[in-house]
Amino acid sequence: LFHYIDPNGIDRTYQADFYLPDYNIYVDPKNDFLINHNNPRYGFKDVEKISLVMKQNNITVIILDKNELSWKNLKSKILQSLG
């Protein structure tokens, strides 16, 4: 569980869906709506939230959309993030 301050200055928590300990990377599949639109619950996009979480906690989170749910795509994103 990670704490972060949202764009409105509110202290919130975040938990990714998966953790890959061999790479020290978190993975969070998201639906297209939450990637491209403001989350009605928070008033900002989930990708913005995850960006804040990564910056404020010094972690890496890979977001996958429905078209990227394969090992090939995940592996490619892992290699990019390890760059």
Image (cartoon, grey):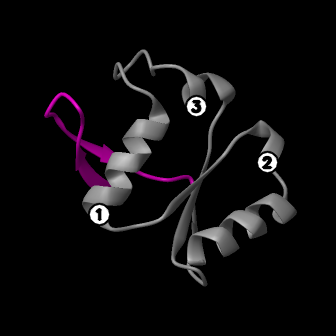
User: Is residue 14 covered in magenta?
Assistant: yes
Please say whether residue 1 is visible from this viewpoint: no
Q: Nearest the camera: 51 or 23?
A: 51
Looking at the picture, which amino acid does disc 2 mark?
Glu
**Horizontal side of residue 54 vs 27, given as left or right:** left
Per the image, label 2 sits on a secondary structure element best described as: helix
In the rendered view of the protein, which quadrant contains the C terminus? Answer: bottom right
Name the residue: 49% across, 53% down.
16
The magenta stretch spans which residues? 1-17
Q: Is residue 42 left or right of residue 74?
A: left
Which quadrant holds residue 31?
top right
Q: Amino acid at mark 3?
A: Ile
Which residue is under mark 3?
35
> Compared to 22, does 57 lie above or below?
above
Task: State the residue position of label 1.
Answer: 57
Q: Quadrant of the N terminus?
A: bottom left
Please tell me how crowded label 3 is: few (under 14), some (14-19), or many (20+) other residues with Cα within 10 Å: some
Residue 67 falls in image quadrant? top right
The residue wearing badge 2 is: 68
Gap between marks 3 and 1 measured at Cα: 21 Å
Give neighbour class at mark 2: few <14, some 14-19, many 20+ (Cα, 10 Å): few
How far apart are the alpha carbons under marks 1 and 2? 25 Å
On screen, residue 63 above or below 48 = below
Specify whether residue 72 is painted magenta. Answer: no
